[in-house]
Amino acid sequence: MLIDKSREITFIHGWLFGPYMWQGVKKYFKQVKKHTLISLSGYGDKSKYTFDNSEQINNILKSSKEGDIIFGYSYSATLILNLDNLDRCKGTIILINPFYTFKDNTINNFCINIKNNFDINIKKFIFNCTKGIKNSKTNYTKLCKLFDNHSKPSLNSLYLGLEDLKNINKSDKLITHSKNLHIIQSLSDEVSDIKKFYQLEKDKFNTYRLEGSPHFPFFEFDKIYEIIKKIK
């Protein structure tokens, strides 16, 4: 099993939710000696607001060794899919719910909305992250509390992240086929349009369907862990 052979795990968070989102996940990997939680630009230490997220993640991919696992979620998973060092990465990459494109709205509209009324529109986004399953209301309350209890990303960093996603959508870059790449996708994702996932599935990428989970699936991580345990 992959986990038994692993020496280091790197966790890279998504858009809006910082590295704290992995805190409940680390316990599943106690047998792995080293855990590294990455803070992207605008999250956490204010002295690190200016670095480029793509460059930072590219360096992580480039420096990874066999036996490493790199987790990416949503925004960071999307960056990884489009980075030059994806095919040079020696570690195993596990991506959860890449942020292909907004399901019901344009990124431009979302930028305007959060500028006009940040709190209401961010809460709508959080609701959509938990929407699509039976216990969505409970998960929404839990995720709002998690978000409110931690430091918020700067508005500028959120805009820059959305700009990254817009540029990726425009470029429509072909994704590198790599044996080390594994993509786990929630089929009840109400944030991202998952048509591209089905195309990757059709193109014989290492893809895994996550039934009955929303865009933020970490409150039911047991389902994800069962998939990961089968990766060799």
Image (cartoon, grey):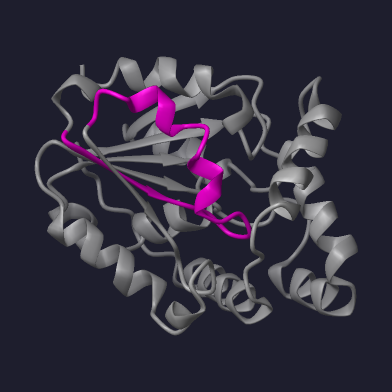
- Residues shaded magenta: 7-32
Q: Residue at x 75, y 75 (%)?
A: 111
Q: Residue at x 30, y 74 (%)?
A: 55
Residue 124 in the image, given as x and y percentages of width and height? 84, 53
Does the stretch in magenta take in 16? yes
Q: Residue at x 64, y 39 (%)?
A: 215
Residue 61 in the image, given as x and y percentages of width and height? 22, 57
Residue 147 in the image, given as x and y percentages of width and height? 70, 52
Q: Where the C terminus falls, by quadrant?
A: top left
Does the stretch in magenta take in 125? no
Vertical side of 12 occupied by 182: above or below: above
Question: Dividing the picture into quarters, in which one does residue 35 lie?
Answer: top left
Residue 25 in the image, given as x and y percentages of width and height? 47, 32
Q: Residue at x 24, y 45 (%)?
A: 177
Q: Where the N terminus falls, by quadrant?
A: top left
Determine if residue 232 is in view. no
